[in-house]
Amino acid sequence: MDLSLEVAVRWNDYDAKLIPLLKEGGITTVLLPDRKEVFEGACREAGLKVLALAEVQFASLESIKKAPPKGLVALTEGLWPGISRGESEGNDQVMASATEQPWVNANGYWFGLLRCLYPSRPALLGYLPDEKAGVKPGVLQHFDSLELALIEARVNGGNYLLALEPRYREKLLGGDAKALDAWRQMGRTAQWLGKNAGLFRQATLPAITVLVEADEALAETVNLLYRHSASPALAPALNPPAPDPLHRRALVAVGIQPPSREVGRRILSHAQAGTSVIVDATGEKAWWRDPRLKLVRRQEDRDFYALGRGQVVAYHAAISDPSEFDVIDVITQPRRAARIWNAPTAVALATDCPAGVERGRALLHLVNYGPWISDDVLVAVQGSYSRASLLRPGAEPLPLTAARRGLTTEVMIPELGKVGVLVVG
């Protein structure tokens, strides 16, 4: 079974009377820990698919490559999506000072890594709502956070195997009105996501391209770029893309294993063509050293070398804290793929636009991990466009004004719910 477009939920209640509830939540596939012939038959009669949970292998990022080629595999990593919360039950607090942005628990980067490293497999996450995922015992999660988990998965070109947080499950099965409302809303959103599935499997804009491996430390660097709406394109470190200095402003090669001489040459060819290549390998592992490099300037933590029409930016030490790693200042703010203002709990992802979308040349996906934003949200996307339209669940496309600002196009969005897709052209 291909789970990439299924709304699949882990379910261990075999009461057939609950099948209508499953359908209200938009569920299309039920993952069962044990086989129950009567319940499975009732599910199939109602149009639901059934799959034994044992048929899905749950694995780490690195061990996925050892899984059978045609088997179903889900990554066990992931945080319960949303903003950081206060300790008291039901008391939501943004964990930040007046000068800091709220910390957002988001998983978009995991889907990007899976799509890059294992392109022949569906990008599936299978984390649970437990302490490993940041869910503290006794702290009630927002009822709509399960919908958010589905949204971020689909927007980033993957899927999440839904798992109900225990207290939410208890209230849902007990008929709690708010829990039921959130569940039914997830069903409506799931329908919209399925209808627009073609929007969410596009390539990100390559302004910042990161070379990646199956390494969780490197994944944190990718996470930071996603979190700051830098919309990084990802490429395997063993197979770098061809130089494209017109669109690719920076090629990030930090935290990777020393490449072969041929692969190292291909990476440095980006700098020769006009791109900024960023590295952090030092000492005997400094594979990037080349007699053609000319030191231009030195900063406290990195050196800048000229090479061809571009440059190599070399950090003095391996990147251990992603927060100290800055790519935006290398490519400059006007050349980043996307920006977003007045929405500190939202993450933007700029991608190509699929053929067939009316007047569309690029997309800006917006996922809001916090409360509904009723104020204007200003966004910018790389490129020059004259039209914009916002797509959202439960609403008609909303035409918006597109304003060209240098190398980017800015659009003012009047409000932002959990998800929106801006089509520009």
Image (spheres, rainbow, N blue to C red):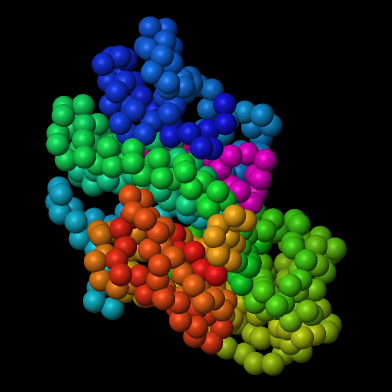
Please state if 414 lies on the left or on the right of 275 as rendered: left
User: Given the current orientation, which residue lies at the most extreme top position?
Assistant: 38
Q: Residue at x 46, y 81 (%)?
A: 403
Which SS does the magenta portion mostly show? Answer: loop
Residue 66 sits in quarter: top right
Give how far across and how far down residue 393 sits, in percent: 36, 51
User: In which quadrant is the N terminus drawn?
Assistant: top right
Q: Is residue 190 above or below residue 91?
A: above
In this picture, which residue range is highlighted in magenta?
114-131
Give how far across and how far down residue 25 sits, in percent: 32, 34
Residue 164 sits in quarter: top left
Q: Residue at x 51, y 55 (%)?
A: 109
User: In which quadrant is the C terminus drawn?
Assistant: bottom right
Q: Is residue 384 visible?
A: yes
Query: 389 or 72, which lies in front?
Result: 389
Q: Residue at x 70, y 58 (%)?
A: 237
Indicate whether residue 128 is drawn in magenta.
Answer: yes
